[in-house]
Image (cartoon, rainbow, N blue to C red):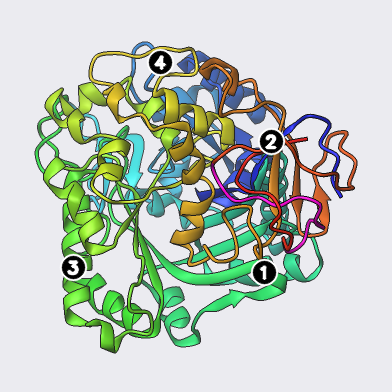
Amino acid sequence: TVDLHGHTVVPGLTDSHCHIFGIGERELRLNLEGANTLEDFLGKVKARVTKTKRGQWITGRGWIETFWKPSQFPTRQDLDKIAPRNPVFLTRADGHGAIANSAALKIAKIDKTTPNPFGGEILKDKASGEPTGMLLDNAMVLVEKSIPKPTAAERQQALLTGINREMGLGWCEIQNAGSHKEDVDLIKKALESGKIKIRFINAIYGPGEDAQHFLKEGVTLDAFNHHFTQRTIKVIFDGALGSRGAALLQPYSDTPETSGYLTEKPEELKPMFEEALRRGIQVETHAIGDGANRMILDLYEGAFKAVPPNQRQIQEPRWRVEHAQIVDPVDIPRFAKLGVIPSMQPSHAISDLFFAQARLGMDRLAGAYAWQSFLKSGSIICGGSDAPVERGEPMIEFYAAVARKSIKGESGEGWHPEQAVSREQALKMFTIWPAYAAFEEKDKGSIETGKLADFTVLSQDIMKIPEPEILNTRCTGTVMRRDCLSTRGLKCHVERSRDISKYFRVTAGCKPEIVRDSSTAVGMTKK
């Protein structure tokens, strides 16, 4: 039994879009989160230089320049002044841009004559033509391939650091938005040794050798006692809005010489998509700009027509679009019509809306982070955090979804408050709807008879407290089957539940394993 001491229970929360290795790497490398000015950023780098041997690489992640004054990318010259003897490569928070110093560019043989790769850009000084050090999307690979790869032990440490952070924040399940084949072996070893205690849904990056191997090998379902499923290929189709790599239908309002770009060639995706349908493999595709979203819907629709239901292992494949941030309003109903699930991260809205108007202009904001429009058109939304792009905290995501304001309570012109969701809808975004998106709605996502007894325990009733108080709500524990995980002063024995609200079916007086007693009903409980 579980004595909750008056705390609130919700169905186990699912982060339906995170990057688990990236979360760990950010914590283990140079973490640049919270660098609020260029000076802060350079100060953090300088401190790391003093601890690093000459010639060794310095890598890190987490900086974002949109709130700096002036709001502009750092340059290689900025880094050269403090790190002349070390190659430096520092990834922007969104993972779609990085700044490299001159030493790193030299190792990668990048100079003024180096052309842009497909799906990426080497930013160059308009006067001299020399690279500034900023590399966007596929251009980042030009330097990344020269950085020594982490050892298996270092990757394992990153994995477990990420897992422990997600578990401590109150997530019961993560849906990991992309892994390489060698990472899967590390994940399985950690599961075998009992080091991963939360549920893990994994996607394999595609196209490429890893995806082709996965197509031949096939899916893995509910392995390690319902703790591991791998049935999805992850595609990255464009860049990010902040770094102007998101593929738009029309040019950027603040940089009219570009509309962003696709990072994969559509014609190369078609055969993989059709084979995935035949083999019962789900596809999820990162698409941020309205151009990328329209194109991926076209590609999905083409694959669905080319491989009709009677030729598929799964007739309704539940393919996903990750982010779906900027969508032309005429394309929003297409998601529900095609059975495509938008996978969205509410914190992106309250981060991006400070600069989105500059990137897009006022008119295009009508289709930006349009949660309520998706729901009214018949879609469900699976909610996630996109950590380490964002902080990964479930209460920030829940607050952003229902308040559509910054964590300081700020709003502004073009924020479209009518797109905020109700608290019931927000709860479903992180419980039953991610379960549906993972083909798991019969086993997870709500508290009802016959389902796995996964609970997240919160310090306050997020369905009733004032909006600002949501941000002060803590996860005080998680319960999965027989185990109380990451508890903070909770006794692991069950008492009868009371004060039951109306959102899901719930039972009381049961072991926290498979819920069997249907004597009470519905979704959040206080005990």
Which of pointers 1 and 2 lies earlier in the amino acid sequence? Answer: 2
Q: Residue furthest front?
A: 519
Residue at screen point 73% across, 63% down: 516
Q: CA distance from mark 4 to mark 2?
A: 27 Å
Q: CA distance from mark 1 to mark 4?
A: 45 Å
The numbered disc on residue 301 is 3
Which of pointers 1 and 3 lies earlier in the amino acid sequence? Answer: 1
Residue beneath label 1, please?
Answer: 226
Q: Which of these two is toward me, 273 or 467? A: 467
Residue 16 versus residue 393 in the image, above or below: below
Residue 104 versus residue 218 in the image, above or below: above
- Determine whether the residue tagged by mark 2 lies in a helix, strand or loop: loop
Q: Which of these two is toward me, 465 or 86? A: 465
Residues packed near mark 2 inside 10 Å, few (<14), some (14 to 19) or many (20 plus): few
- Determine whether the residue tagged by mark 4 lies in a helix, strand or loop: loop
Q: Quadrant of residue 345?
A: top left
Residue beneath label 2, please?
Answer: 52
In the visual, does 335 lie left or right of 31? Answer: left
Residue range highlighted in magenta: 503-514
- Determine whether the residue tagged by mark 1 lies in a helix, strand or loop: helix
Q: Quadrant where the C terminus lies?
A: top right
Identified by mark 3, the residue type is: Glu
The numbered disc on residue 68 is 4
Which of pointers 3 and 4 lies earlier in the amino acid sequence? Answer: 4
Please identify, in this view, whether the residue under mark 4 or under mark 2 is nearer the observer. Answer: 4
Look at the numbered discs 3 and 2 and tell me whether their residues touch, using CB distance below 8 Å: no
Look at the numbered discs 1 and 2 and tell me whether their residues touch, using CB distance below 8 Å: no
Residue at screen point 42% across, 75% down: 211
Identified by mark 1, the residue type is: His
